[in-house]
Amino acid sequence: MSRAPQMITPWANRDLQRAWEKTYQDHRKKVQNAQPLVDTHPPKTFSHLHLKLKKLKMEEERLSIIDRDNCLLLQRVASVMRTRGQTDSGNNFTHRSHIS
């Protein structure tokens, strides 16, 4: 009498093996069909990042200070030119030599 060859693995293990193989094959199909998802678009630009109002305001203040200082300097130079370069200091210092 010959007996039918017995399976090495029990039925539960064989069913588990088939389920794992099916899951793995599904995974491999998904990996093969995957499309690239790299975003190559430039980042969004926001107007408040390009139009720096604080920087513009500070630059305007700096230029107004420079203009004011230039006007004061021009007035001083003009007054020196009108008075023919005389000093307007009221210092009446006399040089005394103390040789002791």
Image (cartoon, rainbow, N blue to C red):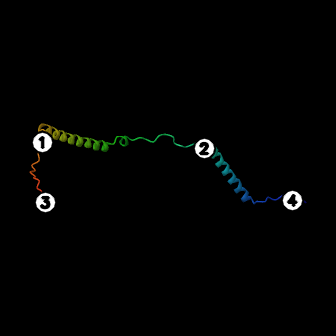
> Are there few (<14), some (14-19), or many (20+) residues within 10 Å of tag 3?
few
How far apart marks 2 and 3 lie (CA) works out to 102 Å
Q: CA distance from mark 4 to mark 1?
A: 134 Å
Residue where numbered disc 4 is placed: 3
Front residue (pair 46, 72): 72
Kindly indicate the quadrant of the structure image that contains residue 80: top left
Position of residue 78 relative to residue 28, above or below, is above
Earlier-in-chain disc, 4 versus 1: 4
Of label 2 and label 4, which has the lower sequence position?
4
x 86%, y 59%: residue: 3
Q: Dot 4: within a 10 Å radius of its alpha carbon, few (fewer than 14), some, or many (20 or more) residues?
A: few
Q: Position of residue 77 (x, y in %)?
A: 17, 39
Q: Which mark is residue 86?
A: 1
Q: Which residue is mark 3?
A: 99
| Residue bearing the label numbered 2 | 34
Quarter of the rendering occupied by the N terminus: bottom right
Of badges 2 and 4, nearer the viewer stands 2
What's under tag 4, amino acid-wise? Arg
Alpha carbon separation for disc pair 3 and 4 = 141 Å
**Amino acid carrying mark 2 in the image:** Ala
